[in-house]
Image (cartoon, helix red, strand yellow):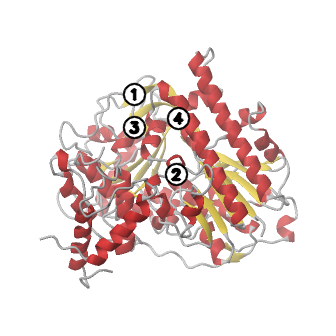
Amino acid sequence: MTIVDPQVSAEIFRLIAELADDWEYDGVITLDTLFLSDLGLESLDLVVLGTAIQHRYGKLPFSEFLAEIGQRPVDRRDLTVGELASYVSQQLAASPGGQSR
Amino acid sequence: MTVEALLIGVDGATFTVLDPLMARGVMPFLAELTARGTRAPLRTVMPPLTPPGWTSMMTGKRPGQHGVFDFFQKESVDSEYFRFTNSQDIQAATIWSLASDYDKSVIALNFPLMFPPPAVKGCIVPGGWMPWRQLRLGCHPDGLFDRLKTLPSFNPRELSLDMTLEAKAIEGCPEEEYADWIELHIRREERWFEIASYLMREEPAELVGVMFDGVDKLQHLCWRFVDPACQPLDPSPWEARITALCERYFRRLDEIIAELVAMAGPDALTVVGSDHGFGPTFDVFYLNSWLAQQGYLAWADEASGGISVEAQIGFTQMTRHISDLDWKKTLAYVATPSSSGIHIVAQDPAGGPLPTETRARITDELAAALAEVRRPDNGKLLVSEIHTRVDAFAGPFEQYAPDISVIFDGGTAVSILRSEELIRGRPLAQGGHRWEGVFVASGPAVRRGAAIDEVSITDVAPLLLYALDLPVPDDMSGVIPAAVFEDGQMARRPARSVTTAAAAPIPMGEDGAVLFDDEDEATILSRLRALGYVE
């Protein structure tokens, strides 16, 4: 079952919305929106986005998360907003304090 | 408010190129600025590279003291993972933060390692490998990006330098792309100038710094067109066109520098400086392949290591060592071609941490073996300088540095790729980094028409602080280069010093006190690449 902390998803939506206008992306961004295929991000963008998210939430083992994505079939090697929100939520829940920072 | 200090950074600039351009009237303003000021070769730090170079200029410290050694940093001292270096890896006060601490306003544009942006008093737009899609996040203060969007020529796509663009500079590109690539860099400098002039009008600051990095890029790719010693004697029409375009770049840069200096006004101390110098490179040495031949490195399998089919350094393969190497058999490796540094593993392949005495023995063995490497064509020694971590990077952060750093005779470039041949010639000369950059200072009390032997890159921060009438922290390596000033200046207005607390060494272990020590960017990138997730 996917568990998404509403505070985390709101924060990620806020971050993407803040940037998406600069990308001239005018589609609706939902939990199913894909970072690479839909938003047109590149690898370095994901890296820096990860920096920004970790700057907000602290240490998160992103490499394990993205490695799992990388092992998927080629046509599924992408990341949805929902997956990212779910992942961050789970990591924060598992961290000391067990809640959003 | 008037500008008290203006720093014009010119990435990779060298007098080898600038002097002929000044002499031929391509850069008349720089010639004038030099004539009314003081010039010197600017000696950079080890390694001669953008991130440590600019960080040393900003902090007045050497890499072992500020903690920045390369574009990529070891995740922790006992890790083989590398991540993108960012602003939070700078473990020292910068001229930007020091000026802010004394309530001076700053403008810092296009300098690397400024993301996430430090909370200074003033404005920051970061440079380096800052993707244009995220540039908003790097601008300080909040709201600055939206203000910049109102500028007539604002175009974040052309402001930021992405890795694809950088790769063209380093590894080359088809002839038909040269012209557009050079023209893009002319536009990039104009866009940075547009931001600089806007902020100097709207957000006056005592300390203004603008960095132009097109010089480095042009010199990497187009060295044979910008160095008179390498220019074609009987150029083809295409070569003549590219040479003219390079000249146009420098002519426009000169105009921009002139306008910036005029805007700063006659009371400002102006410093034009570069993070490292430049010279030609004619061949590539495959350092990881050499380590494999020596028995210190093992590739994971036959297909790993980015097998090289031509003289390339492996720019797009950086940090892939994680998946390319067999860690059960590897003792030493090179993670990036930029640092020319060999790292010895933290974990003994036999199990447990690598004993200190084993690390020392491997260091000695590698240094001795490298000193004997000779060019296959003429038998001459290949390596001109070998530095151990201790002698090159002494300081609280030295454990993040390579164990051995190598400088090659004649500027031979390092490749991290796999190759049967250890040295390959490049078909055409390219540009590579050298120790001596440029330093030109002009302004009140600066000697006119003087040339001094050498200034250290770590001396620039104390000089700028002096111009701001601020005390110089006593833990800086650099000192105010008094020879820049007229006789009696330092007596009339003595330098002031302030004691600062020593930086604490970063503790060993997973939770080392790095300000931002996550499963971070480079790790993500390397794993993504290794898994074919990204190109």
Residue type, mark 1 in image: Arg
| Residue B495 pos. (x, y %) | 76, 71
| Residue B399 pos. (x, y %) | 40, 63
Describe the element under mark 1 as helix, strand or loop. strand
- For the N terminus of chain B, the quadrant is bottom right
Q: CA distance from mark 2 to mark 1?
A: 38 Å
Q: Tag on residue B156?
A: 2
Residue type, mark 2 in image: Pro
Neighbourhood count class around disc 3 (C-alpha, 10 Å): few under 14, some 14–19, many 20 upward? many
Q: CA distance from mark 4 to mark 3?
A: 20 Å
Image-quadrant location for residue B4: bottom right
Please give left or right for residue B14 compared with residue B23 in the image.
left
Q: CA distance from mark 4 to mark 2?
A: 16 Å
Q: Which residue is mark 1?
A: B424
Q: Which residue is mark 4?
A: B181
Residue type, mark 3 in image: Ile
Q: Which residue is mark 3?
A: B313
Upstream in the sequence, badge 4 or badge 3?
Answer: 4
Upstream in the sequence, badge 3 or badge 1?
Answer: 3
Describe the element under mark 4 as helix, strand or loop. helix
